Every structure is written in structure tokens, then in C-alpha cells.
């Protein structure tokens, strides 16, 4: 089942797991600004349960691997009223922050600012 999540301005990083969609939307006179974007398996949380990495949490090949994808998300979303990024995303996957075959996830922080 595909989960679609509409995102409004946030002060913290939000996690988007496999089959979820990052879809920020701004008000009529505002545009999206991506402030931080990380792709990978950075920590146990919404997308990675502790049992999934049991005995592997100290191995950076399984947990802690990530890439800064701010420039990619900035190009896809910043300056627009809305955008949509489905996880997994082909462009994000090209960063290959983790071992091949591991599910990777998006963490993103954005805001809406007045602009055209």
C-alpha cells in the first residue's frame, strides 16, 4: 500500500519510509524551501526498528550510512508551491549511501516562505 503524506512547515527532520511520499505544499503566496535532506539509514526510528538491526547497530554498513541530498531535493522542490518525491526515488538511490539491497529512507526539513 502506497502512503501519501502531505507535509506542512516543519522545524524538525521528518522521516519518509519505503512506499511513502514526501509532498510539501505551501499556501498560495508561498514556495517550498528545503533546509536539510538526508538519505540512508541514519538511526533507529520510524523507518528502522531496533529488531531489524539487532547486533548490527554498531556496523556503519547497516546503520549510520547516509548521504546529504540537500542539493537534489533543492533542485526538485525549492521554489515550487508543491512537489512530490516517492521513496524509493531513482535519483536518491544513485547516491548509494548504504550496502546494495538495504532499504534507505529520506529525512527532510523544509519550510514555506513568501515568494513566487
Image: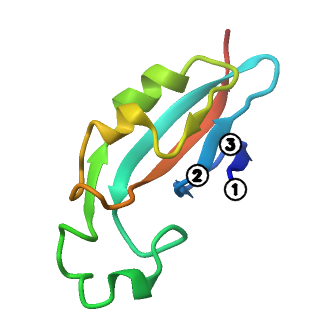
Q: Residue at x 35, y 62 (%)?
A: 41
Residue carrying label 2: 19
Residue 116 relative to residue 79: left or right: right
Asked whether the beta carbons under mark 2 and mark 1 sit within 8 Å of each other, the answer is yes
Asked whether the beta carbons under mark 1 and mark 3 sit within 8 Å of each other, the answer is no
Residue carrying label 3: 9
Q: Is residue 61 above or below residue 94?
A: below
Q: As rendered, which of 8 and 106 lies closer to the eye?
A: 106
Q: Residue at x 64, y 48 (%)?
A: 10
Label 3 CA crowd tier, 10 Å (few <14, some 14–19, many 20+): some
Residue 3, position as x, y percentages in the image: 70, 52
Q: Nearer the viewer, mark 2 or mark 3?
A: 2
Residue 101, position as x, y percentages in the image: 29, 58
Separation of marks 1 and 3 at Cα, in angstroms? 25 Å
Separation of marks 2 and 3 at Cα, in angstroms? 21 Å
**Of the residues under marks 2 and 3, which one precedes in the sequence?**
3
Quarter of the picture containing the N terminus is: bottom right
Residue carrying label 1: 1
Separation of marks 2 and 1 at Cα, in angstroms? 7 Å
Which element type, helix, strand or loop, lies under badge 1? loop
Q: Is residue 100 above or below residue 108?
A: below
Residue 27, position as x, y percentages in the image: 80, 26
Quarter of the picture containing the C terminus is: top right
Q: Based on the displayed image, in which of its 4 quarters is residue 100 positioned?
A: bottom left
Q: Residue at x 26, y 39 (%)?
A: 95
Residue 78 relative to residue 39: left or right: right
Q: Which mark is residue 17?
A: none
Which element type, helix, strand or loop, lies under badge 3? loop
Amino acid at each position: 500500500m502506497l502512503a501519501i503524506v502531505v507535509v506542512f512547515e516543519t522545524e524538525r527532520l521528518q522521516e519518509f519510509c519505503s512506499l511513502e511520499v514526501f509532498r510539501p505544499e505551501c499556501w498560495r503566496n508561498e514556495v517550498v524551501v528545503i533546509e536539510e535532506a538526508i538519505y540512508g539509514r541514519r538511526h533507529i526510528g520510524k523507518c528502522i526498528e531496533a529488531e531489524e538491526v539487532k547486533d548490527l547497530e554498531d556496523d556503519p554498513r547497516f546503520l549510520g550510512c547516509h548521504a546529504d541530498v540537500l542539493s537534489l531535493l533543492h533542485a526538485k522542490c525549492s521554489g515550487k508551491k508543491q512537489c512530490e518525491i516517492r521513496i524509493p526515488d531513482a535519483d536518491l538511490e544513485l547516491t548509494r549511501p548504504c550496502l546494495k539491497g538495504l532499504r534507505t529512507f529520506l529525512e527532510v526539513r523544509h519550510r514555506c516562505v513568501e515568494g513566487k
